[in-house]
Amino acid sequence: RQPEIAHGSLMRDAKLYKTLAMVHMARRILPVISLPQDLPGVLMACAGFLITILATIQLGMVRTYFGSELGFVKPKWIDGFPYNAIPHPMIVGQLLGWGSVLYWFAVREERLTTETITLIGAHMSCYALHMVQEMATSSY
């Protein structure tokens, strides 16, 4: 492949920046959680993020980070859960998780700052845009 792609660095950097983003969001959201009354909201968010984790497990790390698209592994049809039940489960899981946070902590009760709501909205917009891009350029 020309130009050469440092796939290991891509995976490392993507995991690093995702971790930093999640830690940043956790630092903004965790202080407003009050258990047990917020347990339903927390469980809804965890359900969404769990879908993403299960999708990552099905794909494996190399395919999760565009290994197939970049030619590092052969394309392979994934038919295990959640791919057999949810279209674009990584993105849908993130949208469900963050949407649950917004609903529970911003719509139902106004406990998130405007900045936090904006960050979550931007995060969700990027995921939605990526999903539209995947759907528009899909090979199946």
Image (cartoon, rainbow, N blue to C red):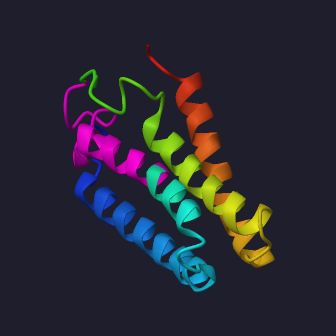
Number of marks in the image?
Answer: 0
Q: Is residue 2 above or below residue 20?
A: above
Let me know if residue 59 appears in the view: yes
12 sits to left or right of 32: left
Q: Is residue 119 above or below residue 57?
A: below
- Could you say which quadrant of the image residue 139 lies in? top left
Farthest-out residue, left: 73
On the image, the x and y values in percent for residue 98 come to 59, 57
Can you say which quadrant of the picture contains the C terminus?
Answer: top left
Residue for point 49% across, 21% down: 138
Let me know if residue 3 appears in the view: no
Residue for point 62% across, 32% down: 132
Can you say which quadrant of the picture contains the N terminus?
Answer: top left
Farthest-out residue, front: 36
Residue 82 magenta-highlighted: no
Residue for point 74% across, 77% down: 111
On the image, the x and y values in percent for residue 131 come to 57, 36
Q: Which residues are magenta?
A: 48-75
Choose between 111 and 91: the one closer to the eye.
Answer: 111
Choose between 24 and 81: the one closer to the eye.
Answer: 81
Residue 64 magenta-highlighted: yes
Q: Is residue 126 above or below residue 31?
A: above
117 sits to left or right of 1: right
- Could you say which quadrant of the image residue 103 lies in? bottom right
Q: Is residue 118 above or below residue 60?
A: below
Residue for point 54% across, 80% down: 30
- Could you say which quadrant of the image residue 70 lies in? top left
On the image, the x and y values in percent for residue 125 come to 68, 50
Choose between 54 and 71: the one closer to the eye.
Answer: 54
106 sits to left or right of 78: right
On the image, the x and y values in percent for residue 121 come to 71, 59
